Image: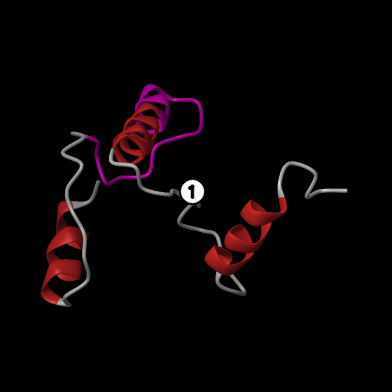
Amino acid sequence: MDDELLMELTKAGIPAFSMSSGLTTKDFGWGSAQFHKMGREKISLIRTFVHWRQDVIISDVDTVWMKNPVEYVAQVSTEGPNLLK
């Protein structure tokens, strides 16, 4: 959603793409119209990846992963529906 960041990621060789969402890069308040639009844009992005048959892990930008979540998800997905016993 941030074209400046997209350019920096691209220059660094990090795979990225523009959502072309039209959202501002300024902070917008929780519950505002822009906040809700951002949520809808995220859902649309998730739908796109699922349509492409990609696995998706959603995380806010202010989340810190202490370990690789893919390893955990791969383990849990093979254990079936009763994994949280």
Residue farthest toward the bottom in the current orientation of the protein: 12
In the image: residue 60, left or right of residue 37: right
Residue 80, relative to residue 47: is it above or below? below
Q: Residue at x 43, y 49 (%)?
A: 55
In the image: residue 82, left or right of residue 8: right
Residue farthest toward the right in the current orientation of the protein: 85
Q: Percent x, y for residue 47?
A: 35, 32
* Magenta stretch contains residue 75: no
Q: Percent x, y for residue 45?
A: 32, 37
Q: Percent x, y for residue 76?
A: 67, 56
Nearer-the-camera pick, 8 or 34:
8
Residue 74, relative to residue 47: is it above or below? below
Nearer-the-camera pick, 22 or 13:
13
Q: Which residue is mark 1?
A: 58
Around disc 1, counting alpha carbons within 10 Å, would you say few (fewer than 14), some (14 to 19), or many (20 or more)?
A: few
Amino acid found under the numbered disc labelled 1: Ile
In the image: residue 63, left or right of residue 78: left
Q: Residue at x 32, y 30 (%)?
A: 44
Find the magenta span and give its range: 23-39
Q: Percent x, y for residue 3?
A: 15, 53
* Magenta stretch contains residue 29: yes
- Where disc 1 sits, the SS reads loop
Nearer-the-camera pick, 83 or 49:
83
- The answer to whether any part of residue 64 appears in the image is no
In the image: residue 36, left or right of residue 62: left
